[in-house]
Image (cartoon, rainbow, N blue to C red):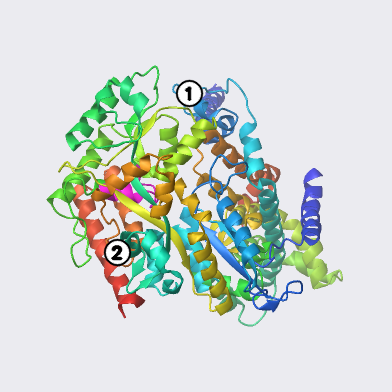
């Protein structure tokens, strides 16, 4: 009887509630109906744009603010922009997109003709959209003041062909993070660097560290801990995996922009990773662990060494201070290499403007990007990672001594994308090969060889399709 | 004597079979148990080794955080509405089409049925972009109805229910017609009650399918308030929050409505799957 009633009740309730609720969020996502229409109140044309971003830092300026969230900064910036903007009656919708949903959402929306107006993200993840002709050049909103305040290296990073496609805001150098308390507990005091130092170890020293962490870490205090983070579930955080593959001296890309990992040094690096995994120096199940999982394991003191960047590092410290994660002494180190020179890389983060085919929206989008990327107050938010503006670095260098350490470290930067077209798709090729290697389906030599063959195919195809090469 | 020995043998087989079934049931249920109990622990207790098989201290703070920091209630409503209404409409369209393919005679019936069924071989991912364009043109982006309509006419439902209608003797339909019942009345009052187990099975199968229709719901529900529970919880899993228990609470919130639906309709589901296998 109850089931019979349920059969009748479920549709009735669903239909009624649906009709009442309307079930539509169509309140002008990207401004199609609003664009160009006259605003009754202000007498200016009303233009609505959408801003998408992947999670960067929480809070407008600081993660300790109340209700700090990933969209806080852009909501604050949008509010400030709208109040002072006199060309149009602008409305800005801000939306946070999970990193692993970015390409699916962008591709479907691009094909549907409704890309977001502005996307704030690491340049390496968005470069392909410039190659595909989906972005608007930003040369006209970059003035001399910005060019002199932001070092040329950053402009080179955001220039594709002859045009600037991203307005640099901050950068995120990639390093290792380590739990200094665990190091001390394993008798590794001499390997612990200073609080404001990015410690450099040789590869031999690093191997010693991993050995000591595996054998000497007190099990009563760290019952479920492993020396090093290793992950290959998806493409998230893959830049560290790319760095590990360079540890034995492989240069990764040749001068023509082809992958050249398949040599003695590339295979040695892959073997080193596989041996670490097989011998229990890393977390188990690397093939099914994501970088997010690894980061959470590190923050829960299950891993002694993990990957990090300034945003993750600052978020970790904020989580510890807020009691969301156990407190421990977290410090930074470089990715070691056999040559002794450390390996480091950086993600330049900035905004790009998509071609929407609507001139007014493009104009507002560009104005907004210029505004939040150059407003003296708003650019201070770049302190949550590493500012690209020397004026902001000068202002905060005493408060954030690590800025200087990152600056010194920049001598060891390598370009992990090689500026090759098709980099986004290339990322889809690496992790399946690493998975195959970790589960024993392929030898390190086979994984490296297959990655090179598949990767070069991707690059070749993307090169042919790039609008920047035409 | 031989009878008694046979009974004893059967009993011992039953005992072994039951032990095996219970073992596999525990294996299947353990992840759900672990998920739920972990969601009631502190983050550090989730990763403790040896683990606490039962939470030493219970906390609902992880659930509070899920519902406070995210519009999880709205996501739950969205998922229930989308999965519920899609499934109801699918049952209506599929039962009518299946009845027609099974019992009515019309020109080109087999050809149309084969074309219809061939659509099962086209993965939905292939149709995402054209479907998205249609949804845009109809103003259905960021609208729950945009998640519903593409799921209303699915060949699988017709295929499943046709098997049930085929198993109903034609004589029954003819008798109803002789008694003066029209086609609609025969369909609604004679046929539908007989194929109810099939409808129950289709309901639960389709409900699960739409509930988990991640990619389509991701591209249609782009605003935070328009996300469904699966998409919203997947986004939450991407959060850099180090609290494992919080993520467990999110996953539990996503799993519970599905479990309730399954428990409510499991009778129809099992009867329906068994019933569909029998033909006249």
Residue A8 position in % (x across, y down): 80, 53
Q: Is residue A239 magenta?
A: yes
Residue A194 position in % (x across, y down): 32, 31
- Residue B280 can be seen in this image: no
User: Based on the displayed image, in which of its 4 quarters is residue A42 positioned?
Assistant: bottom right
Alpha carbon distance from label 2 to label 1: 47 Å
A202 to B265, vertically: above or below: above
For the N terminus of chain A, give its image quadrant. Answer: top right
- Residue A198 numbered tag: none
Q: Is residue B23 left or right of residue A420?
A: right
For the C terminus of chain A, give its image quadrant. Answer: bottom left
Identify the residue shown where x is 76% and y is 74%: A40
SS class of the residue under badge 2? loop
Give the residue at the far top of this rendering: A220
Identify the residue shown where x is 29% and y is 52%: A433
- Mark 1 lies on residue: B51
Q: Nearer the viewer, mark 2 or mark 1?
A: 2
- In the image, the segment drawn in magenta is A231-243
Instruction: Give the chain letter at badge 2.
Output: A
SS class of the residue under badge 1? loop
B144 to A293, vertically: above or below: below
- Report crowding for label 1: few under 14, some 14 to 19, many 20 or more residues within 10 A (C-alpha): few
- Residue A419 numbered tag: 2
Residue A146 position in % (x across, y down): 41, 63
Instruction: Give the chain letter at badge 1.
Output: B
User: Based on the displayed image, in which of its 4 quarters is residue A341 positioned?
Assistant: top left
Residue A238 position in % (x across, y down): 34, 50
């Amino acid at each position: 009887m109850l089931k019979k009633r349920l059969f009748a009740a479920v549709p009735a309730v669903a239909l009624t509630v649906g009709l009442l609720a309307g079930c539509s969020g169509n309140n002008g996502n990207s401004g199609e109906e609003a664009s160009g229409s006259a605003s009754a109140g202000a007498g200016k044309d009303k233009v609505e744009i959408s801003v998408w971003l992947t999670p960067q830092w929480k809070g407008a300026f600081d993660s300790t603010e109340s209700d700090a969230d990933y969209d806080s900064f852009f909501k604050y910036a949008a509010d400030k922009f709208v109040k002072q903007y006199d060309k149009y009656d602008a409305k800005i919708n801000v939306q946070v997109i999970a990193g692993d949903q970015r390409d699916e959402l962008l591709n479907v929306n691009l094909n549907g003709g409704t890309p977001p107006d502005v996307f704030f993200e690491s340049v390496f993840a968005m470069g392909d959209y410039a190659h595909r002709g989906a972005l608007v050049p930003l040369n006209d909103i970059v003035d001399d003041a910005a060019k002199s305040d932001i070092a040329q290296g950053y402009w080179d990073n955001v220039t594709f062909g002859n045009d600037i496609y991203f307005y640099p805001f901050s950068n995120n150098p990639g390093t290792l993070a380590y739990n200094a308390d665990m190091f001390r507990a394993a008798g590794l005091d001499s390997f612990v660097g200073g609080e404001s130092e990015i410690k450099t170890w040789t590869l031999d020293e690093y191997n010693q560290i991993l050995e000591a962490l595996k054998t000497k870490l007190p099990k009563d205090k760290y019952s479920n801990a492993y020396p090093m983070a290793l992950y290959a579930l998806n493409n998230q955080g893959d830049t560290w995996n790319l760095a590990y593959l360079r540890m034995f001296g492989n240069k990764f890309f040749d001068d023509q922009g082809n992958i050249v990992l398949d040599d003695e040094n590339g295979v040695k690096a892959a073997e080193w990773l596989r041996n670490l995994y097989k011998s229990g120096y890393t977390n188990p199940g690397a093939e099914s662990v994501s970088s997010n999982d690894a980061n959470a394991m590190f923050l829960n003191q299950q891993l002694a060494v993990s990957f990090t960047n300034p945003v993750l590092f600052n978020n970790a410290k904020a989580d510890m201070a807020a009691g969301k994660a156990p407190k421990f002494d977290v410090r930074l180190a470089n990715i070691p290499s056999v040559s002794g020179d450390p390996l480091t890389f950086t993600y330049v983060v900035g905004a790009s403007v998509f071609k929407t085919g609507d001139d007014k929206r493009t104009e507002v989008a560009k104005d907004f990007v210029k505004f939040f990327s150059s407003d003296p107050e708003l650019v201070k938010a770049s302190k949550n990672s590493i500012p690209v503006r020397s004026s902001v670095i000068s202002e905060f260098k005493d408060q954030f001594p690590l800025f200087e350490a990152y600056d010194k470290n920049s001598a060891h930067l390598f370009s992990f994308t090689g500026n090759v077209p098709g980099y986004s798709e290339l990322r889809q090729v690496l992790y399946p090969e690493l998975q195959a290697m970790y589960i024993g389906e392929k030898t390190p030599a086979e994984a490296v060889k297959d990655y090179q063959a598949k990767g070069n195919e991707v690059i070749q195809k993307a090169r042919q399709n790039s609008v920047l090469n035409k | 004597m031989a009878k008694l020995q046979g009974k004893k043998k059967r009993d011992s087989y039953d005992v072994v079979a039951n032990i095996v079934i219970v073992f596999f049931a525990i294996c299947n249920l353990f992840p759900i148990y672990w998920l739920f109990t972990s969601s009631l622990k502190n983050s550090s207790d989730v990763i403790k080794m040896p683990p606490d098989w039962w939470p030493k201290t219970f906390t609902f703070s992880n659930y509070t955080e899920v519902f406070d920091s995210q519009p999880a209630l709205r996501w739950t409503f969205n998922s229930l509405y989308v999965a519920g209404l899609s499934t109801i409409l699918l049952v209506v369209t599929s039962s009518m089409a299946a009845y027609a393919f099974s019992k009515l005679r019309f020109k080109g019936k087999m050809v149309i049925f084969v074309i219809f069924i061939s659509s099962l071989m086209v993965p939905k991912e292939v149709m995402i972009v054209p479907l998205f364009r249609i949804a845009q043109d109809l103003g259905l982006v960021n609208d729950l109805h945009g998640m519903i309509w593409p799921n209303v006419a699915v060949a699988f439902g017709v295929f499943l229910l046709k098997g049930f209608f085929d198993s109903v003797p034609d004589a029954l339909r003819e008798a109803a017609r002789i008694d003066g019942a029209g086609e609609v009345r025969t369909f609604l009052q004679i046929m539908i009650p007989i194929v109810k187990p099939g409808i129950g099975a289709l309901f639960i199968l389709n409900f699960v399918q739409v509930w988990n229709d991640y990619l389509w719901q991701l591209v249609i529900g782009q605003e935070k308030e328009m996300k469904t529970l699966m998409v919203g919880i997947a986004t939450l899993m991407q959060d850099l929050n180090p609290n494992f228990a919080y993520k467990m609470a999110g996953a539990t919130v996503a799993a519970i409505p599905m479990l309730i639906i399954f428990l409510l309709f499991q009778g129809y589901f099992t009867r329906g799957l068994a019933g569909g296998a029998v033909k006249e």
